[in-house]
Amino acid sequence: MIEEVGTTTEGDLIINVGPQHPSTHGVLHLVITLNGETVKKVEPHLGYIHRSIEKMCESLSYRQFIYVTSRMDYLSSHINNQGCALVVEKGLQIEVPERGKVIRVLMAELTRIASHLLWWGAMGMDIGAFTPFFHAFREREAINDIMEETCGARLTMNYVVPGGVMADIHPNFQKKVNEFIKLLKSKIDEYYILLTGNIILQERLKGVGVISAEDAINFGCSGPVVRACGVKSDIRKIAPYDGYEKVKFDEVFETAGDSFARYMVRMNEIRQSLSIVEQLIDNIPEGEFQAKTKAVLKLPKGEFYSRVETARGEFGVYIISEGGLTPYRIKFRSPGFSNLAALHHMVKGSKIADMVATMGTLDLVIPDIDR
Amino acid sequence: MFIVDYIKDVYNGVTSLLKGMRLTGYYFVHPKEIITQEYPEVKQVLPERFKGEVVMRHNENNEHRCTGCTACELACPNATIKIVTKFDITPDGKKKKALDVFVYHLELCTMCNLCIVACPTDAIKMAQTFEHSVYDRTELTKVLNKPGSKLMDGVE
């Protein structure tokens, strides 16, 4: 057990970053052992916003438990909901209509863009650039407006139900999304001028927080963190769900494994997501948006698992059912937890300012880590 | 070659900064691109699907469509809704279950829309309000059926 204040016997300083600290995201508490300005050890302490979501889900029915997962990774709440709906559909063998699938994918990709935009803004703030935040939020606001019109909420949409989506798309949806595609295409180059090409950002991120592909896999990292090491890990490609096999997009790779590689993976993923939205928006098939389901859903006895690719990585839902109205046990595999586990390995031996930059590129959402 | 690299670095650094500053300057002299919304003075009209709070539909004769079937109460994940029923005497002398009080706890509600979807008679809907701040939390517990209201004819 590490002391939380003071010095160690070797004379190293122990300081706390967080739980309330402007450079950490949310209530993340890090106990750092410092030798001068060099980080020797980083130990994340969790539990500040633990809400026992897994336990809560055990008392909720298979329709009700979906909304709770919006409160985990609130920046890609739609994709979390989608993962939960997929596991229920798998257990009950419900076939989602094509229209429902396409609407889900469209919403998921818009969510991914919104999440990456917010990350980009917050990432700039982490390393001291304030302007990107406003630029990112301007475009994110356009997505939020689209979400608000069709799903009824801006962040915790709860738009996915087992069997499809809750309501059909709003009549303005296609027009607004087409406008948004045009808007983001004109603005995305500004991001490169403003931050990506900036010499200060490149100097602060290149060669910082390096992790090898082997270590990243061993830590269980997923999403952009592991793709920045050149590992094939996109669930949309490995195990396609909801019709991702029909759309054309590239899995984004970098090979360096440092913070800048993670940065570039996310920036290029925005373009890929935009191309998915572009392919689907004018080709939404006609038909039902929701499959007919029974009023009371009961999963058969057994174990079910499904996984989706959120903006942060692989999100898995594991349900053990006893055949009743509620799950017997539910387990969420959240991407943020494993990515945070690799933080110590990434920043060991680097300066404390590099640790903040590395944390920024990990894209930590604390409620996702600390459920 | 150290000097050449050094000058190259300085040149690249300065140009990259100037490029960014040029963009910032562009927005500085183009105030039309600013999308600030002056909230308390100018209020945005929210889309009709916006989930603000649950309200009950009433027509001009103070009639609602709620039969007191408790489908919304069962669908709610947070025990937000509590329905109290009573027995009405119909004109032909039979006892009939009817809605007495529809209690709605806004302080527990997460606006998940499941009650609206579950309602078989389309009695409740989401309102587009969002300024829910009050001084006392008891003010957030609401009774949705208006006083003196009764069930609309033809709703079973």
Image (cartoon, coloured by chain):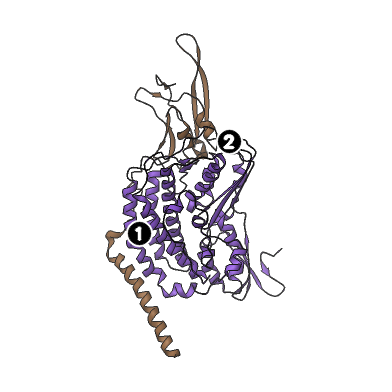
Q: Is residue A70 visible?
A: no
Front-most of A292 and A262? A292
Can residue A42 be seen in this snapshot? yes
Q: Amino acid at mark 2?
A: Lys
Res A226 → quadrant: bottom right
Left or right of residue A2, residue B140 in this image: left
x 48%, y 9%: residue:
B93
Give, as a three-letter code, the residue at label 1: Leu
Q: Is residue B116 left or right of residue A320?
A: left
Q: Which residue is mark 1?
A: A184
B140 horizontally vs A45: left or right: left
Q: Position of residue B72 (x, y in %)?
A: 50, 31
Chain identity for the colour brown used in the image = B
Subunit ID for the residue under disc 1: A
Q: How many marks?
A: 2
The x and y percentages for residue A40 are 64, 72
User: Helix, strand or loop at disc 1?
Assistant: helix
Task: Assess disc 2: are there few (<14), some (14-19) or many (≥20) residues with their C-alpha within 10 Å of its C-alpha.
Answer: many
Q: Secondary structure at mark 2?
A: loop
Q: Earlier in the sequence, mark 2 or mark 1?
A: 1
The chain holding disc 2 is A
Q: On screen, B89 above or below A250? A: above
Q: Nearer the viewer, mark 2 or mark 1?
A: 2
Q: CA distance from mark 2 to mark 1?
A: 43 Å
The purple one among the chains is A
The spot of residue A171 in percent (x, y) is 33, 42
From the viewer's perspective, is residue A249 above or below residue A207?
Answer: above
Q: Residue at x 61, y 76 (%)?
A: A36
Label 2–label 1 contact, CB within 8 A: no
Q: Which of the labelled discs sits on residue A298, or is there none? A: 2
